[in-house]
Amino acid sequence: MAARLAVRGGERRSLDLKARDVVTVRDPQGLQMAHLFAPADAALALPPSARPLAGGGVNLFCEDSPPGATATFRTETDVVCVLAAPGKASTPAEQLAPTDLEVVIENRGAGGWDAGPLAEPKAEFLVKAGTATAYKVSAGDYIQILDVEGRQCSDFLAFDAAALAQREERGLDPTVTRTVLGLASPAPGLYAKYFDSTVRPLVEIVQDTVGRHDTFLLACNAKYYADAGYPGHPNCTDNFNAALAPHGVAPRKGWPAINFFYNTAVAADGSIRSDEPWSRPGDYVLLRALTDLLCASSSCTDDIDPANGWNPTDIRVRLYDKATSFEPGSATRMTPDAEPRLTRRSAFHERTAALSGSYQDYKGFWTPTAYSNTGPIEEYWACRERAVMIDLSALRKFEVMGPDAERLMQLAVTRDIRKLAVGQVVYTALCYEHGGMIDDGTVFRLGQNNFRWVCGDDYCGVWLRELAARHGLKAWVKSATDHLHNVAVQGPLSRTILKDLIVTPPAVAALANLKWFRFSVGRIDEVPVVVSRTGYTGELGYEIWCHPRDGLAVWDAIRAAGAPHGLIPMGLAALDMVRIEAGLAFAGQEFCDQTDPFEAGIGFVVPASKTDPFVGSSALARRREAPQRQLVGLSSDTTEAVGHGDPVHVGRAQVGVVTSAVRSPLLGRTIALARLDVACAAPETAVEIGKLDGQQKRIPATVVRFPHYDPDKLRARQ
């Protein structure tokens, strides 16, 4: 399997290449140069496009490279090269920030891919294919388990070393761990711990570039292979027994293990299924020992099913000293073959971290769930009565530019982009040809041929580039997520707080005069920003967009200006409460690729007056004429929890499903958004929300108009 990695825009990366490697560098977004530096005596077969740089090295791409441009070179000997994606930081009003390069390295033989240690290793060794190794780890030290060639399961055991010295085996306990955490699979972060039978944590997950493992199925054993017709087949359990025997650990017929990289799932009927691992060459899990441990790692022997891609390979283990510092994170991949990227910090993280110990990995960014001295309810009321500030940097931003940029956006989104003036913003949807939604988001028009698409899904950028290529449009779609972070200031006092803080040029709208769904450029204490009158709360509000280098200055200035008015930070828990009250859609709940904008409750983003064809227009025209399902509001007096996925019934029949629900502090009722059959969607229709199996327990509810709060959106328009 080829190794895939990325060079981040504006950064450089060392490539430890072997003889006869074939390296393909790809510019997926276009307009990004690639500078390659190698020793003077390096034997490289460079592509014809390579041009010498004045200071040494070569440039692999021209300055106007199209999206998807590639350059391939070969190595004749082992060599260490440096590949850079040069570029300067841009202001929020600019659109030429440096973007990532993709690198594919092939022909590495049996060595696989190893990007090198994360820090100076304390020790390292290779667990050869089909073997197991025992090793000791001191409290606080880190353990990196790396899949060298990809698709290789590595079972992991750990024992309390002090207890083992007293002849007491206290290893990882599946029942205790699953009970304490309420989780069946490993996940990164402070609470991703594994416990022994005395409820003492032994290890925690710090980093994970795969996100797909099994926890506590048995390591493969002799019975498994014998039952499959392979008596005497090598197995991980026997390998563990042999490796642990010198340390006084009694043998077992089957070891419950953390099965890293093992891809299992529980089917709807409760059965356990497995398939090829998700791991790619160089993927790893990083753990931290919480006490002195005896550990054991295997390279699984299984070659009779897809568990190891039918071909067991090596596993590398590295140990790092406890003095080393590693950022916790789990990886996301924009596409299945992309390099994993660990959870990131936003430009405002230093300030939010001082106020909150409750974070979640939201779309690849650490984002506060709630703040320690307030909590969701207090934050909710601050938003409704005063003002709050919310870190929304996890939103994806794409710069769309070029002579055909308007044609691309007109083709891609449901709204009529030709009617959008410079300085305006419009909320719209991206759809597939069958009418199902890709995502929702906002389009900013920065110029005649310049747009900014703000959404929730990285895939939007890939889809827009593919659409431009398919229709022969000269337009570039450049990711700006890493160069444009944003904080929302929402609530009835938001204008009062910001009107004197943001200074705008005379030629553009001042904040006090900025209309709904308009944006302007300005400065906060000489820091360049873009301010838009947009939000996700149903209140009067704004979003401030800045370069990450200026994030702390922007945060501090807003907090200082807002302090006399009772402004506080708000986390995602309270944000979910206010957006449900305001009837605002959320991906994966109100919509997905199986629902159209009408079924998601945002049919207004598909104007019948748009005559230009767009992706999905024919399907949406049919769906408009013959709707099957409709998003409605539900209201109930219940104090019981109602949640996404709960069935909605009329009599015995299920007629729909709850998409989002919350106990509204302001309304004093449980409210929900639900997608129902159109036959049952009329206001005042009595329905029941099913619990347990949907039949044995029912919660009465009534179909009502939504949004539940400020249904005419007068507060946001004021």
Image: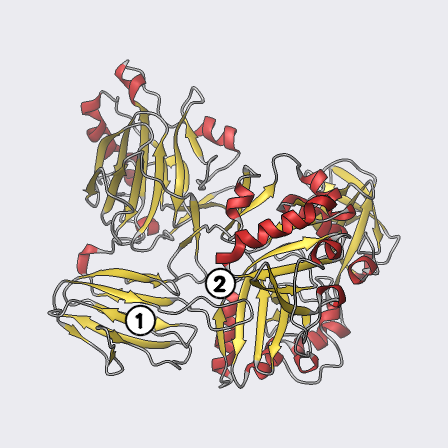
- Residue drawn at x 33%, y 76% as measured from the top left: 70
- Identify whether 281 is placed above or below 480: above
In the foreground, 246 or 528? 528
138 with respect to 635 (left or right): left
| Residue 216 placement (x, y as % from top left) | 40, 35
For the image, the number of numbered tags is 2
Picture quadrant of residue 441: bottom right
- Residue drawn at x 71%, y 63% as measured from the top left: 599
- Residue drawn at x 31%, y 45% as measured from the top left: 153
- Residue drawn at x 25%, y 45% as measured from the top left: 315
Picture quadrant of residue 76: bottom left
Q: Quadrant of the N terminus?
A: bottom left
Amino acid carrying label 2: it is: His
Of the two numbered discs 1 and 2 on the same chain, state the one appearing first in sequence. 1
Residue 646 appears in the figure: no
Q: Residue furthest top?
A: 166
- Identify whether 243 is placed above or below 510: above
What label does residue 25 carry, if any? 1
| Residue 36 placement (x, y as % from top left) | 25, 70
Name the residue beneath numbered marker 2. 483
Mark 1 residue crowding within 10 angstroms, few (<14) / some (14–19) / many (20+): many
Amino acid carrying label 1: it is: Val
Task: Nearest to the eye among marks 1 and 2: give it.
Answer: 2
In the foreground, 472 or 666? 666
| Residue 266 placement (x, y as % from top left) | 49, 44
- Mark 1, secondary structure of its residue: strand
Residue 154 appears in the figure: yes
